Amino acid sequence: MIRQRPWAAIAAATLLNLPMGSLYAFSVLLKPLEESLGATRSELSVVFAMATICFTLGMNMAPRLFNVAPVPVLIALCTAGGTIGLALAATASSLVQLAIGYGVLFGICGGAAYIFLQQGVNLLVRGHRGLVNGYIVSLYPAGAMIAAPAFGWALAQWSVRGTMGGLAAVVAATGLAATALVLLAGVQLPAAGRQAASVGGTSRVWIFWQIWTVFFLAAAAGLTVLSQAAGIIVAYGGSTAMALAATTAITGAIAAARLGGGWLVDQFPIPVVMAAAHVLALTGTIVLTLWPTPVVSLATLAMIGMGYGFISGATAGAVAFYWPSSDYGRIASRLYIAWCTAAVTLPVLAGHLYDLSGGYRLAVIIAGAGNLLGIVLACGLPRQAPATHGTDDVRRDSPDARG
């Protein structure tokens, strides 16, 4: 029998997901890429959108590849693909080459590796699944926090090509280490097993769409904050220095909230955690609408972002409670489509509304309406079994569970 080491699986996920999380720090590279390629801001925004879409595509391709090859081979292939993609981006002489390298290859390989590693962790870890999954989803914003100042330093030392080449080297090194750790962990990805049709009398299909919508509504507001926090704070009268510092702080707060959201579903009912997260974000939108000042905008944007972070961590933990561990990657990858959809809806609409009105007030009100709907939907979710730490326990409590 293969000896399994959960700590090695968690370490592998940490090593590879942190540099992959630099995707969230792409904005730091915008100006030097404009100068290097002669591209416009809107053209580079398309490259980032492609990376986001391809990341989601990679996540949804991953479950179909679980039994195609051993996990270390799959991680090695993702590492190779991501490294090649970044190398192409580093040597890009055209926008098309940048889009293929960064948008397509780096995006798809990053998304697939994320699901391979998260599925492996969920197969090995038996307790505190909410906390563990909250930790994993916190790695991407944490990686962006590390990447943003690292990119700034590298750009001052070298060109944008050297910076992206350095990122390629980091992905290659951490990917090789993650491959070795996955082999040491003894991760094997099984095919999806039989599962009960419901949890506590509630259809799993209905549960999926409830969580999908709750996650989407929180992510739409949160990603608007992540993508436009600096612009929003300046629009409410804040200084540029204040806006930049607040952006970094808000990103850190979201990373911490993702970890906290996972931990909370180990301690409290999932509907309570998700509804409370939306209440936090809704409170932020109401306060910002009533008192639109620079200091208030800083605090309330953090509240909106943290509401999204708590939901993100709680969603990752909820999958571990509502579905068997063998189905984790399949369900999680489909739920992350909500994240991708959110990224191309309210943040884009917020920018358009700003162009029309010169402010973000209407976008904030729309986000608040979404939070209100999220509270209602979250309250309708079933409670996981008390004092348990895994999906199998929830399934045994289900009246429809089959042996």
Image (spheres, rainbow, N blue to C red):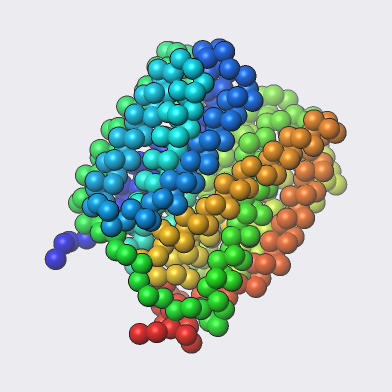
On screen, 100 above or below 194?
Answer: above
Residue lying farthest left?
A: 1
On screen, 36 above or below 76?
Answer: above
> Could you tell me which residue is drawn at 48 percent across and 41 percent down?
54
> Could you tell me which residue is drawn at 68 percent across and 47 percent down?
221
Q: Position of residue 87 (x, y in %)?
A: 36, 24
Viewer-proximal residue among 69 and 390 = 69
Is residue 214 shown to the viewer in this render? yes
Task: Report the quarter where the C terminus lies.
Answer: bottom left
On screen, 63 above or below 240?
Answer: below
Task: Report the quarter where the N terminus lies.
Answer: bottom left
Viewer-proximal residue among 347 and 242 = 347
Is residue 129 shown to the viewer in this render? no
The image quarter containing residue 402 is bottom left
Residue lying farthest bottom?
A: 399
Q: Position of residue 253 (x, y in %)?
A: 57, 44
Quick check: 3 left or right of 233? Answer: left
